[in-house]
């Protein structure tokens, strides 16, 4: 049987152990909740913006352009290319004069 001081030390150590264990569990749970929140935020954003024009917000349709599917706005007729699609189009079509012919027909004010 220990002294009162030793029993107090044992109790303090147990409390410190459980305090630390609880702190770690709470931190792990916060990380899980934050990760789930980010995943839900991405899911919500995807549902909200999926196939919506980044310029005017109207619906977009998938159209074929030089053999690949790109998104085209039904309203402003803007085109949206996924990652790598512009490089693909440039590599594939530049030699054939696609962009040269587009430039010739362009009425864009900056060209
Ligand atoms: Zn648009």
Image (cartoon, rainbow, N blue to C red):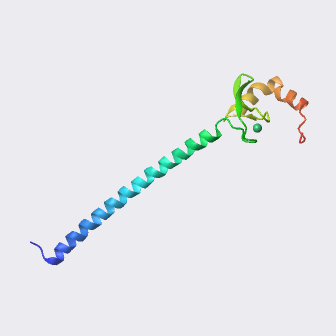
Query: Where on the picture, by quarter, is residue 89?
Result: top right
- Relative placement, left or right, of 89 versus 39 is right
Quadrant (top left, top right, bottom left, bottom right) of the C terminus: top right
Specify whether residue 91 is in view.
yes
Note whether 71 is above or below 96 in the view shown. Answer: below
* Number of numbered discs on residues: 0
- Relative placement, left or right, of 8 versus 90 is left
Give ligand 1's quarter of the image.
top right
Query: Where on the picture, by quarter, is residue 108?
Result: top right
Q: At 76% across and 30% down in the image, what residue appears? A: 90
Query: Where on the picture, by quarter, is residue 83?
Result: top right
Residue placed most toward the observer, 35 or 103: 35
- Relative placement, left or right, of 80 versus 1 is right
> Residue most toward the left?
1
Q: At 28% across and 62% down in the image, what residue appears? A: 18
Specify whether residue 87 is in view.
no
Note whether 40 is above or below 23 in the view shown. Answer: above
Q: Position of residue 36 (x, y in %)?
A: 48, 47
- Relative placement, left or right, of 33 versus 16 is right
Residue placed most toward the observer, 73 or 32: 73
Q: At 85% across and 29% down in the image, what residue appears? A: 102
Q: Position of residue 45 (x, y in %)?
A: 60, 43
Q: Position of residue 76 (x, y in %)?
A: 80, 36
């Amino acid at each position: 049987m220990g002294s009162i001081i030793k029993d107090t030390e044992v109790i303090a150590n147990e409390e410190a152990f459980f305090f630390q264990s609880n702190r770690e569990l709470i931190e792990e749970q916060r990380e899980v909740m934050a990760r789930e929140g980010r995943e839900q935020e991405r899911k919500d954003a995807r549902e909200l913006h999926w196939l919506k024009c980044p310029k005017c917000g109207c619906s977009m349709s998938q159209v074929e352009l030089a053999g690949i599917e790109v998104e085209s706005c039904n309203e402003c007729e803007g085109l949206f290319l996924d990652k790598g699609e512009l490089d693909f189009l440039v590599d594939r079509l530049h030699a054939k004069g696609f962009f040269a012919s587009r430039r010739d027909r362009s009425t864009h004010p900056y060209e």
